[in-house]
Amino acid sequence: MDWGNQILGRPILAQVKQDCQQFQTPLSSQHKQISIIRFLPPSNISGVEASGYEAARISTEQKVKAFNYLRLSTMVHPLSPETSRQDFSELVERLNHEESTSGIIIQYPIPRLLRSLVDLIATEKDLDALRSDSISVPATAEGIVRLLEPFASSDATIAVVGGRGFVGSGVVRLLKERDLEYFIVEAEDDLQRVRDADIVVSVTGQPELLDERHLSPRHRLVVDSGFIPMGNRIYGDVNETARSIPQHCTPVPGGTGPVEMAVLMERVIQRELNSELQPWTYTGMPYLNRDKVAEIQGIYPIVRILIQVKADSIDAIEPEMMRFRGKDYELVANSQDRTVKVLDQHGRGELLRFGFDGMPQFVGDMQPIDYEKWSRIRERVRIIARNQSVNQRSTNLELD
């Protein structure tokens, strides 16, 4: 499936690794290690709850790879779900006092009776901002906000789905610090509210919570931070069939996971070496604001008919332009000069150009089959215009 313009985390992580190569030797000479505590799943769980423990296992493996790249050793402590408060406290306190331990990370999910003991992590070793009084935020939250910043113009509104959770509250905190407009939606709320936003961040961990009912081409960016391994698949918060609807979307996997690793690697270097390493930034991709999307959506009846049923992908390719790709044709709508170019997908170039009013402006290498299709299109556009009161002169699509 074509997901349109994906925002990939792996290239960001690759660049951060390249930038961090110079620090491998200094870190290695310190003989420090990162300790990761992970709880094993209880024997009587299944479904989404069990997937949380599997996600923690995979995340632990990715962290080990990231820290090993920096030539830091990593000690993983797998604990039983029945671990007592005393045993857990003693482990954390021991790691706090170990001079060789540079950072302590505790993977969620954490047994309910032990969660308050997370605050025992020494402040200087709280690499992932787990303490309730941390001055920082979780690495995933920081990475998410860095991704969305290029899309968050002054007129943007951000919906944070799951904004009261561990990662979500970190995202909200950073948005507030940056004076960005946002609102929180929880999984049990009316998710239709998401349609009012320009940017959507979903951090619920509930498989395929958001779908065609909630997402729209007016969404400049959807950040899917769900990672739910179930069966032979890894699910995100966004239904796979809806990923091509927004202008940009992070994939699962390969989106926010690598970004989290990139942030953690930076934090280790900054803490251990007092480095002036500049935080990585994301430059963003072209997007259309809500007014431009609304304007271009005026041609949707023609688009849907031309490419037969619906667009396989919809991409913003410049601030004024949106591209619709279909099986035989590709349309490029330009809201600045109010034209639509019809390009052949099989090498014939531009076949037709028409205005938003439906009037043709250019006819290129059209074949009989193209005329036949446009004859049917013209009649169907008339029907749509009549039945849905589409405000455009699409009945004038004459090609002769």
Image (cartoon, grey):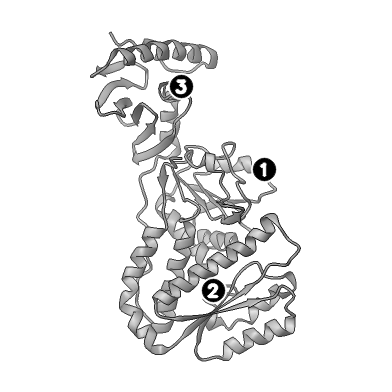
**118 to the left or right of 35:** right
**262 to the left or right of 122:** left
Give the Cα separation between the discs numbered 1 and 2. Answer: 32 Å
Report whether residue 178 is seen: no
Which is closer to the viewer, label 2 or label 3? 3
Q: How dense is the environment of label 3, judged by Cα within 10 Å: few (below 14), some, or many (20 and up)?
A: many
Give the Cα separation between the discs numbered 2 and 3. Answer: 51 Å
Pick the residue in front: 232 or 56.
Answer: 232
Give the Cα separation between the discs numbered 1 and 3. Answer: 29 Å
| Residue designated by label 1 | 190
Residue placed at 62% from the left, 54% from the top?
A: 230
CB atoms of marks 1 and 2 within 8 Å: no
Residue 301 locus on image (x, y percent) = 46, 21
Corner quadrant of residue 79: bottom right
Name the amino acid type tagged 1. Asp
Q: How dense is the environment of label 1, judged by Cα within 10 Å: few (below 14), some, or many (20 and up)?
A: few
| Residue designated by label 2 | 135
Residue 379 locus on image (x, y percent) = 44, 10
| Residue designated by label 3 | 301
